[in-house]
Amino acid sequence: MSKKIVKPKLRNKSARKTERVMLQSVKGMRDILPADQPWWDWIREEVGKLADYYNFGRIDTPILEKAELFEKTVGEATDIVEKQMFFVKSAKDRLVLRPENTAAVARAYIEHGLSRLPQPARLYYIGPMFRHEQPQEGRFRQFHQVGFEMLGGEGDPVYDAQTILIFYRLLERLKITDLNIQINTIGCRTCRPIYRKRLVDYYKSKGVCRDCRRRLSINPFRLLDCKGEKCEEIKKEAPIILDNICDGCDCHFRTILEYLEQIGLPYVLNNYLARGLDYYNRTVFEIFTKESTALVGGGRYDYLVEMLGGPATPAIGGAAGLERWIAVMKSQEIKLPPAKTRPKVFLIHIGNLAKKRGLILLEELRGAGIKTDEALGRASLRAQLKQADRERAKVALIFGQKEAFEDTIIIRDMNTGSQETVPLEKMVNAVKRKLK
Ligand code: HAM
């Protein structure tokens, strides 16, 4: 009997508990709160300026794409396609949240005939990407990339150097220091298969980790990416592409290095830099901090447009993870540029009539391009004045019962405390003078 009484009570308790569970953001995805927006604004502003100086046009592609787009280009045997794509339920298509944007830009290039524009078409983007990774410091499931891509034209090494340059300049403008540019070539259709065979021959007799044993048959270049202690040791003796590339790739690579030296960009040759995506050929590069955080990654992808059914189209580009940039900016104690805040006016109302008419006055001020603030939900004069002070309003407008009847308003200078009463029809001009 007693059990019967206790049981429903327990159920109620646990039900109440469930009701109180707070919903949180999805694992690996974060809110960007107003306090952090100035970092994003700064980056967006500098990206916009550089894009303009270097003549890149902005492209926004949809966040949803067909899974096939990435399977065909990024590669079936890559982490991104094998395990990191977020699928979105759809009755007809296999859709995913885009894990990266280069393939989508190439799709758009073909779809909209961008090859008819002066070549190379220079395109840039900023936006969220999604990868189902194990979240950790600097690794999220939703993160934002800025990317610069050049498609079409001659495939000249000068564009490879320019791509690295634009990212380096962007990082410089954001005052990020201690950068390390690493560059390598991974060859082309002619020389890459020869190197691939040498790699397989070298690795097949070595005791690599289980993942690498699997990679050996599907994508042996990925063995060079393995961070396992034993595999890192084995890598030290692995054949390098530079000993195996054709004359065309050799000349292309040397010319890039010459250009980088010409512009004075410091770089390090990393013979084992392979990059995890299948669409690359020839140049690959990354920009790291001295703590080895990858801030930018990119490379040449001359076959990508073809993979998607378009004509042979040389292309080069790169992308950067902005959450990582901001974390590095904060850890390097970089100061945000002074905020460009416009002085504002705060309306203080006393009584219901003033509140109602105050709504119209605020609209009049905003219509005249004046930044306004208010606490119309509060009745107390003291509380409103305190808030005006805390919000650093330059001018407070005090509008009470008496003023509402007389069609006047009190203008208070919040710095000096001096006040004057003006007729309502002169309010906008009087406020403008005070805010100057
Ligand atoms: P990626 O190396 O996969 O290349 O990504 C580029 C950058 O995005 C990385 O260097 C890193 O800063 C950032 N990133 C990547 N994954 C995450 C993550 N889970 N959380 C936070 N940041 C991340 C690409 O995406 C290529 N589409 C780059 C490219 C453009 N190649 C040619 N053009």
Image (cartoon, rainbow, N blue to C red):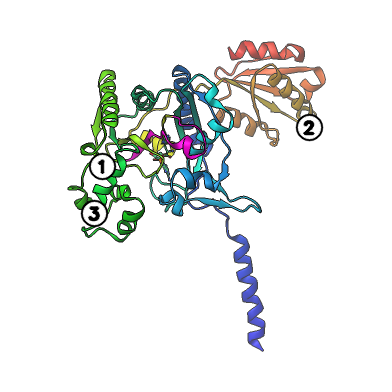
Residue that protrudes farthest toward the front in the picture: 190
User: Foreground: 234 or 403?
Assistant: 234
Asked if residue 57 can be seen in this view, the reply is: yes
Front label number (2 vs 1): 1
Estimate the x, y position of residue 304 in percent, counting from the top left.
45, 37
Say which residue label 3 marks.
203
User: Foreground: 170 or 399?
Assistant: 170
Residue drawn where x is 33% and y is 55% of the image: 217
The residue range painted magenta reads 293-313
Say which residue label 2 marks.
352
User: In which quadrant of the rendered view does residue 400 lie?
Assistant: top right
Is residue 120 positioned above or below 75 on the image? above
Residue drawn where x is 44% and y is 23% of the image: 153
Which numbered disc, 3 or 1, marks the residue that appears first in the sequence? Answer: 3
Say which residue label 1 marks.
272
Task: Tell me if mark 1 has few (under 14), some (14-19) or many (20+) residues whose alpha carbon lies within 10 angstroms of its own.
Answer: many
The amino acid type, in three-letter code, at marker 3 is Tyr
**Relative to 251, 60 lies left or right:** right
User: In which quadrant of the rendered view does residue 380 lie?
Assistant: top right
Estimate the x, y position of residue 115 in percent, counting from the top left.
52, 25
Query: Are the two marked residues, 3 and 2, in contact with CB atoms closer than 8 angstroms?
Result: no
Which numbered disc, 3 or 2, marks the residue that appears first in the sequence? Answer: 3
Estimate the x, y position of residue 99 in percent, counting from the top left.
49, 44
Front label number (3 vs 2): 3
**Relative to 179, 59 lies left or right:** right
Residue that protrudes farthest toward the left in the picture: 237
Residue drawn where x is 27% and y is 37% of the image: 290
Residue drawn where x is 43% and y is 23% of the image: 337
The amino acid type, in three-letter code, at marker 1 is Tyr
User: Foreground: 265 or 14?
Assistant: 265
The amino acid type, in three-letter code, at marker 2 is Asn
Which numbered disc, 2 or 1, marks the residue that appears first in the sequence? Answer: 1
